[in-house]
Image: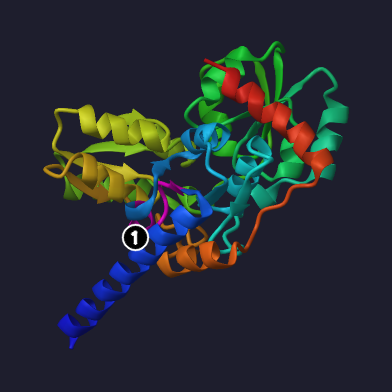
């Protein structure tokens, strides 16, 4: 029975992929997939990447339609950077709890208290928050962005863990918002110690969205892309991975002969995983849900995103 069910599933996926190829051609569409998506989504994407790479692709594409397989704020960023494109997502329920931890009123109050500070906002945030921001960053370029800002005082929004990590690379005063990633923040020192006991020959690689005490234990700290590149280039053959488990697709693809152990079974973002191949096909059939950003918000948010893209 299991073999039959697997065969049926494979046949369904084959039909969905064929339909997807047809729709992409009809809609002149490009599919962008975050590294945290399900394998079946990453397999059919035109580009896989972290938030920074996908923001660049959205800004550069000649396609008429951008299908953003990620969470809602990513679709918003694509729409802001490519306002003349149609941007759709497979499931509008794909939100980000960390992005919801910061609000416009609270940020404006913080700006009033610190009038000389510049606001640096992690890309994991809503369009409305980006519109209140001087410059956006990602985990890949956060340190460079902080160093590029012409102020000695920084309001950092919304991830306190990434903010703590970045603060170690600057003498600037960091006023850090109390947000965090529900998934990365679940990883504990106990988890890492137990995994190192179980796999003593493995290197521990970690995303800076994890807790500071966990990050301190790492052999390598970096963005999702940086982790993937590090593991690919390393002579080491075994790794304990401290980031969302969807990253395993690219890790295994790049390094099929290496072994990867995720540091906790809870490193799964439920919001990223609501997207699947069936929903991806359906959203291209219906061209819904479509992402819309009010023009006044988009104009101000666009400046903060474009400033990020200019940082080298």
**Badge 1 density bin: few <14, some 14–19, many ≥20, Cα 10 Å:** some
45 lies above or below 154: below
Residue bounds of the magenta highlight: 31-42
64 lies above or below 166: below
Residue projecting furthest to the front: 26
Residue at the image position 22 percent from the left and 46 percent from the top:
252
Residue projecting furthest to the bottom: 1
Q: What is the x, y in percent for residue 202?
A: 18, 39
Magenta stretch containing residue 97, yes or no?
A: no
Residue at the image position 63 percent from the left and 62 percent from the top:
289
Using the rendered image of the protein, determine whether residue 275 is visible from the camera's viewpoint.
Answer: no
Q: What is the x, y in percent for residue 224?
A: 40, 38
Using the rendered image of the protein, determine whether residue 163 is visible from the camera's viewpoint.
Answer: yes
Residue at the image position 84 percent from the left and 36 percent from the top:
108
287 lies above or below 199: below
The residue where tag 1 is placed is 40
Q: What is the x, y in percent for residue 182?
A: 53, 53
Front residue of 230/81: it is 81
Q: What is the x, y in percent for residue 286?
A: 58, 67
């Amino acid at each position: 029975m299991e073999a039959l069910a697997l065969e049926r599933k494979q046949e369904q996926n084959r039909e969905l992929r064929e339909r997807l190829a047809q729709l992409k051609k009809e809609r002149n569409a490009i599919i962008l997939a975050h590294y945290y998506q399900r394998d079946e989504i990453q397999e059919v994407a035109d580009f896989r990447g972290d938030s920074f790479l996908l923001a660049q692709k959205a800004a550069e594409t000649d396609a008429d339609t951008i299908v953003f397989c990620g969470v809602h704020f990513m679709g918003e960023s694509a729409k802001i950077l490519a306002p003349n494109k149609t941007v759709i997502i497979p499931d509008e329920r794909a939100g980000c709890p960390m992005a919801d931890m910061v609000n416009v009123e609270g940020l404006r109050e913080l700006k009033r208290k610190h009038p000389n500070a510049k606001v640096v906002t992690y890309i994991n945030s809503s369009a409305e928050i980006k519109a209140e921001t001087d410059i956006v960053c990602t985990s890949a370029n956060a340190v460079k962005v902080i160093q590029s800002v012409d102020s000695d005082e920084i309001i950092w929004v919304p991830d306190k863990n990434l903010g703590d990590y970045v603060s170690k690379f600057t003498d600037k005063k960091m006023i850090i918002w109390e947000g965090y990633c529900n998934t990365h923040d679940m990883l504990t020192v106990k988890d890492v110690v137990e995994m190192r006991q179980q796999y003593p020959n493995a290197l521990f690689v970690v995303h800076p969205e994890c807790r500071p005490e966990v990050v301190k234990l790492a052999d390598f700290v970096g963005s999702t892309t940086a982790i993937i590149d590090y593991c690919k280039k390393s002579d080491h053959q075994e790794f304990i991975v401290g980031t969302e488990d969807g990253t395993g697709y690219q890790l295994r693809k790049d390094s099929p002969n290496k072994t990867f152990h995720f540091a906790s079974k809870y490193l799964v973002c439920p919001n990223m995983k609501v997207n699947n191949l069936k929903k991806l096909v359906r959203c291209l059939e219906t061209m819904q849900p479509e992402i819309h950003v009010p023009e006044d918000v988009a104009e101000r948010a666009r400046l903060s995103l474009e400033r990020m893209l200019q940082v080298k």
